[in-house]
Image: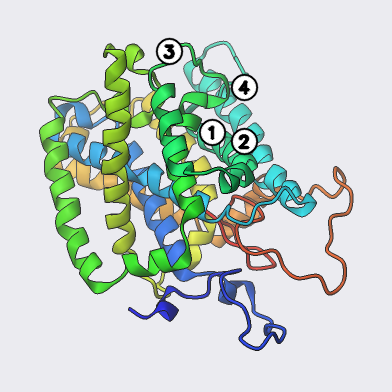
Amino acid sequence: MPPTSLGTVPGATTPADGAAPAAKSPAAARDPFFDNAKFLAIVLVVVGHSWEALRDDNRVLAAGYLLLYAFHMPAFTLISGYFSRSFRHEPRQLKRLVGSVLVPYAVFEIALNVFRAWAEGEELKISLLHPWYLTWFLMALFIWRLTAPLWQQVRHPFLLSTAIAALASIDPWIGPDLGLQRVLQFLPFFVLGLKMRPEHFTRLRERRVRIAAVPVLAGGALVAYWAVLRMNPDWFYRRDAAQDLNAPWWAGVSMTVGMLVCSLVLSFAFLALVPGRRTWFTALGAGTLYAYLLHGFLAKGAHFWGWYDNAFSGTVLGAVTISTLAAVLAVVLTTAPIRRVFRCVMEPKLDWLFHDTARPSGAPNTPSGGGSSTSTGRRDGEQSAI
């Protein structure tokens, strides 16, 4: 596949003769490959959450659950790192980071906890320092992106981040504050994405790699089926130390390295099969943050209200129906009407909070990855992970 098949990667190309680049619309500036990847990954996230209550009595679904958790969030984190390559703590970048990550984190951390207290009839407890359920990824994204310039400067960043992840996995004293276990254990995926370049994704989509990706994912499914009866699925959440999972400390190191390798292989196989052309769902890739945060209310509500407590949910037809409804929900939550309704909290305008960060007239655009960490459409065509 020729290099041009990767699509337009903002910030990755420059005019051959030094002339000013032609103006492009945001839609044209976005690379369809990454929007496709984000959309497909968020569908898998929502479907995976719909299987949580079904997997105890269904080994096939339990294997599918393990397989999805082995790569869907690592893939998101990898792409997050890729689109953080140009983050330099510039005022405009920091403003967008706060508006597109920190504000949604605070809003949905409060909203999800209020929802839980209401649905369960329990006392309301909120702590913005303890991410609950889905919001951990936003907190992690905020911390990762702030540290991106540091990882660009150190030697052997991937090996260093892997060592940090392994050390975190054997330290039971790292508590729930800021979701630090996940921040540190997922860190190698972010750092690797930070060091990747457009040509790496081009190679992933070569024909031979795409062909090899099919047996790799099939093999992963078989291994997951075998592991269902032999492995604690909590390892894949990366939120606990080895001792918290009743394992010896050295298991944390071996599991960190082993799962890192497996997750990367499966993530690359998944990305290899993502179409690089525009498809019917490409535009929906701009709304993955919306689907990620909003589906949590229904995903948890289904448990709170006992929607799975019926005979139909335990049947093959029931599992297929629930999976299909979850996929449809993911599609709906990425659509433009949903984004318009919730944009005020997902992408709030914070001009009242910050000094004017507008670029001087004639200043060049910041390459992709230097702005927000949401994947919603930007006026300047920026694109990022979720």
Q: Disc 4 and disc 1: Cα gap in Å?
A: 11 Å
Check contact, mark 3 vs mark 4: CB within 8 A: no
The correct choice, above or below, for 230 with respect to 345 in the image is above
Tell me which amino acid carries mark 4. Answer: Leu
Q: Of the residues tagged 2 and 3, which is closer to the observer?
A: 3
Q: Counting residues from the N terminus, which is met first, the one under dot 1 or under dot 2?
A: 2
Tell me which amino acid carries mark 1. Answer: Thr
Q: Nearer the viewer, residue 277 or 143?
A: 143
| Residue that badge 3 annotates | 172
Q: Of the residues tagged 2 and 4, which is closer to the observer?
A: 4
Task: Confirm whether residue 348 shows in the render.
Answer: no
Q: Counting residues from the N terminus, which is met first, the one under dot 2 or under dot 3?
A: 2
The correct choice, above or below, for 77 with respect to 175 in the image is below
Tell me which amino acid carries mark 3. Answer: Pro
Judge the density around disc 3: few (<14), some (14-19), many (≥20) Cα neighbours within 10 Å. Answer: some
Q: Counting residues from the N terminus, which is met first, the one under dot 4 or under dot 1?
A: 4
**Secondary element at tag 4:** loop
Q: Is residue 348 left or right of residue 288?
A: right
